[in-house]
Image (cartoon, rainbow, N blue to C red):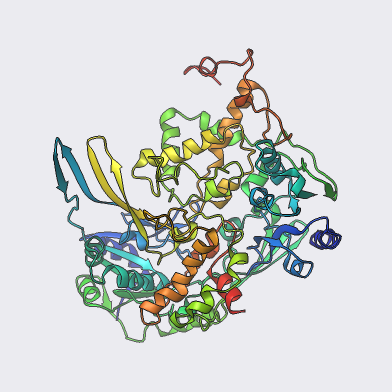
Amino acid sequence: MKKISLTKLDEFFAAVAASQNLYLPVDGAKGAEYSLWTEGTVMSKAYNTLRSAKDFFFPQVETLAAFKVNGKNIEVEDVRKETEDFVVFGVRACDAKSFEILDSVYLADPVDSYYASRREHGVIMTLSCKKPTETCFCKAFGIDAANPGGDVSCWMTDSELLLQANTEKGEALLASLSILEEADDNAADSEKEKLQTILDKLPLGNLSTESFGGDKLMALFNSDKWEALSESCLACGTCTFVCPTCQCYDIRDYDTGHGVQRFRCWDSCMYSDFTLCAHGNTRNTQMQRFRQRFMHKLVYYPANNNGVFGCVGCGRCLRSCPISMNIVKVMKALEG
Amino acid sequence: MQEGMVKRASELLADGTVVRVLGWKNGEFVYDPTPAVFESVEALSDFVYNDFCASNLSKYLVALSKKEGKTLVFLKPCDSYSFNQLLTEHRVDREKVYIIGISCDGKVDESKLRAQGAEGVTGIATDGDTITVSTLYGDVQLKKADVIAERCVTCKSKKVVAYDEMMGENGEENPDCGRFDQVAALEAMTPDERFAFWRNELSKCIRCNACRNICPACTCEQCVFDNPKSGISQKAAADSFEENMFHIIRAFHVAGRCTDCGECSRVCPQHIPLHLLNRKFIKEMNECYGEYQAGAEAGSRAPLVNFTQEDCEPSIVYTKEASK
């Protein structure tokens, strides 16, 4: 384990940013968002960012290819630029886990080379939570907020930042930072204990996943609770867009006037044209679309991924749904 | 008030006046009630009405008034303006709705609680003007006036304008609410400053469509932006032009129909002050065609669909140098 005094935090950020872009949570008018670190940037103390960190690997919009039409010739252009190395600092345990969920989709055969390139060039430095909040329920999905994962796990005591590399990429980054000093391997223990006492008090800390999983498919699919749960859903995409694990996208063509830019963008199962096919749509009511989202997280995804659930309990959907309907309410209603 | 609402709803369900009740259902926490339909007296045990029941229920009546039987709905003053507007546009069936008007002294904005240090909320108790928030990290005492939603700070009217019966005293309109002050501040900027302001705000948009879907004036069966055959359907803005276009087109489409209920800004997960676009339109229409409040009266003719020979020519009123 390595350490650095908090009085040298800016020097530490400068050292990381010297050879690559560094992003970290910064306070905005309405909450924290990841921003590029430049000299003078102050890291946010918010419990987490408004938007998740998935944009770094799976941006909301990206151009896949461009087509130039010249008479009867169509020229296909690979518009990808070399991905630059970057570091994301301050990722919470829940969001760090979300990358594993995205990986299992995008790095499985056939590998999504756009996503893979960003994963290869990005280093995740997590930071243990200081003040988890009432909407946090990562524990329900087996996530230990006190050991936040990523390429490097970090803890902040009152006086020091402690760093522990978890991967080769993380080792290499820490080795490159001569500003760091050696620390005892158990230096973060008291910080972990402090966090544990708060985690034990979280109101959603004991949320149970027992009633869910791939083997509960038919009973959950046919539950008579979906109608009432979905009745006031507005069919907006807020929950899916703030979600760190929602991974669906659509591919569209944008007419530039001289050619076509083929881009992909986040899609939402809440939308009426989600998975629209030539024959029409497989889900024609909002109840069916609403059910799809929760079945995907709690049944379909674990069925295909050794029981791992497709939710990390970050609680963003609890805070941003316009009508305050969310996965916690759905889970409690379905099991009750 | 909640007790009285449940009592009256139970009576109307029991005597057959209505077959369902549209209201709010208890949430996981104090601050997260969900709009819900109750079809029996027993189900009303989950009914809640508190400082956090901000959702405008009027739009749900578009679907509910197509169902068999009457729906009882509780409408706050701003919701009742939306209801009248929907009536004007023949989107709800008045005969299928029974309205109980409820007074409102402003709803609490949960994000303001958090901004003032109440993070990790485990309970909220209101005592007059004081709100005590219990959190995982200790109690926080706040004044209600400091955590009231922005739209309620500049509340245009506490008068319920459509109801079958009122619960408690009806309130008054408040023409001096100052709701156009922020618009005036934007108008006072240079065009470059104003452009920078809106680019900064609209660039945060994630196209979740929450503003559109909550909007009681947005009741098209299928939005042009959702229709793959329209040629302009968008799931995400491809560039900054499209980012601006969605919001500006939406503001144009609801111009003269927007009642200024403020739901668009309340639900925006990116906290974009979208209501300012609509307010700009309202302010300009007031200046050009005289004061008009959409939804104040069912069946009224909005200035933009009511040509008179005395109508001004906005392009002449708003010349580039004009002070207005």
Residue B168 falls left or right of residue A179: right
Q: Is residue A137 visible?
A: yes
* Farthest residue, direction front: A279
In depth, the one of A288 and B2 nearer the eye is A288
Task: State the quadrant of the N terminus of chain A.
Answer: bottom left
Measured as percent of width and height from the top left, residue B150 is found at 62, 47
Measured as percent of width and height from the top left, residue A223 is found at 57, 74
Residue at image coords 47%, 53%: A272
In depth, the one of B131 and B229 nearer the eye is B229
Residue at image coords 56%, 41%: B275
Task: State the quadrant of the C terminus of chain A.
Answer: bottom right
Rendering quarter of residue A183: bottom left
Count every numbered label the image shows and give the total.
Answer: 0
Measured as percent of width and height from the top left, residue B42 is found at 77, 70
Q: Is residue A156 visible?
A: no
Residue B14 falls left or right of residue B199: right
Residue at image coords 39%, 82%: A188
In depth, the one of A232 and A227 nearer the eye is A227
Measured as percent of width and height from the top left, residue A200 is found at 54, 82
Residue B315 falls left or right of residue A303: right
